[in-house]
Image (spheres, rainbow, N blue to C red):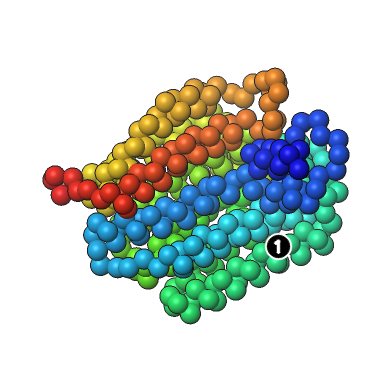
Amino acid sequence: MSERLRVWKTAYNTANLPVGMTTPPDAVSKWIVITRAAVFSMTVTSGLIGGLLAIGGERLLGGFTVNYGLLALAVFGLVVAHAANNMINDYFDLEGGIDTDDYVRAQYAPHPILSGWVTKRQLGAAILLMNAIDLAILVFLMTQRGPLVAAFALGGLFVSVFYVAPPIRLKHIGLGEPGVFIVWGPLMVVGTFFVATGQIPGWAWIASLPYAILVTSVLFGKHIDKIEADKKKGVHTMPVLLGERNARLVAQGLMISFYPIVLLAAAVGWIGPWVALVVLGLPRLAEVLKVFNQPRPETPPHSYVGWPLWFVGQAFVHTRRAGALLILGLLLNAFFPIKLPWL
């Protein structure tokens, strides 16, 4: 059992199996990798930001009440939707001839179908199951909050499906990054806020932007790693359109911009001042910016997991640190609210 737990932990932390593992993966570790559960933390963070903004607003500003049961259900639904999204990407990229044995996707982690772990039919069934669960959650939330919930859910579903599915294929025309920004910011954060409270104050839209920027920087990192492979496949992600050097500069700008936006939102009173704790993420930011200053190395460091991906891991580490500090600040805002003297 301890060995199995070690495999599950590795699969969750790296979206891959332990190096040198020769035995077939058990069902749990297999689906942890297939759904790419390693990145679910970004979705949970977006949902928690929406919930904590609601709780903090309730205690500091007043005017609405938080329903904690609906809040928890909304966050769960977001994670299920993220799992479906990841599988949809693999399904349609394989269908469209993008994912092959020599493409980046099959090199940094096992591809669900190309690895032989599941058949195309089984992956399709898993996608339908995840979406059926989310549909049930959506119907219930609509009975509690009205039809506006559907606008948030269907907006996310549109980006999820047509990120790679024909005829739109947002990723192929440089719109994948803006799509992710919209989903992990306004749709997830403000949508969760609305489910929790039944209201949407104007400041919630602004407060949803900083973390959306960080998630977008992670996708930028991944697409920078795949520039050459995507060029050959005719996939015009934003880094492909910008070029490798310019894309690294944009990714750096995205990561940097998170901090002044958070601090400005606190300074004008949209969110409590405890979020200033995000400045503790600046040392990590400095390390990641140094990595983005240089092209990817020709060969991976010793024992490196996930090659040929490079920049995405660095951006993810920064996003995880900055996101955790933002959550901590929002928690303190919610339970120990204070007002700045000039407000």
**Residue in front for this viewpoint, 97 or 286:** 286
Using residue 111 as the reference point, say whether residue 12 is left or right of it: left
Residue at x-position 70% and y-position 67%: 129
Q: Determine whether 17 is above or below 181 in the image.
A: above
Residue at x-position 66% and y-position 38%: 14
Q: Determine whether 198 is above or below 185 in the image.
A: below
Q: Quadrant of residue 274?
A: top left
In the rendered view of the protein, which quadrant contains the N terminus? top right
Residue 186 can be seen in this image: no
Residue at x-position 46% and y-position 67%: 69
The residue under label 1 is 127
| Amino acid type at image mark 1 | Ile
Pinpoint residue 296: horizontal percent, then vertical percent: 62, 25
Pinpoint residue 163: horizontal percent, then vertical percent: 62, 55
Pinpoint residue 87: horizontal percent, then vertical percent: 70, 55
Numbered label tally: 1
Q: Determine whether 69 is above or below 184 in the image.
A: below
Residue 165 can be seen in this image: yes
Dot 1: within a 10 Å radius of its alpha carbon, few (fewer than 14), some, or many (20 or more) residues? many
Using residue 125 as the reference point, say whether residue 343 is left or right of it: left
Mark 1 lies on a secondary structure that is helix
Q: Quadrant of residue 50?
A: bottom left
Kindly give the residue lying farthest to the left in the view shown: 342
Pinpoint residue 29: horizontal percent, then vertical percent: 74, 46
**Residue in front for this viewpoint, 152 or 74:** 74
Kindly give the residue lying farthest to the front in the view shown: 1
Residue at x-position 35% and y-position 44%: 329
**Residue in front for this viewpoint, 159 or 13:** 13
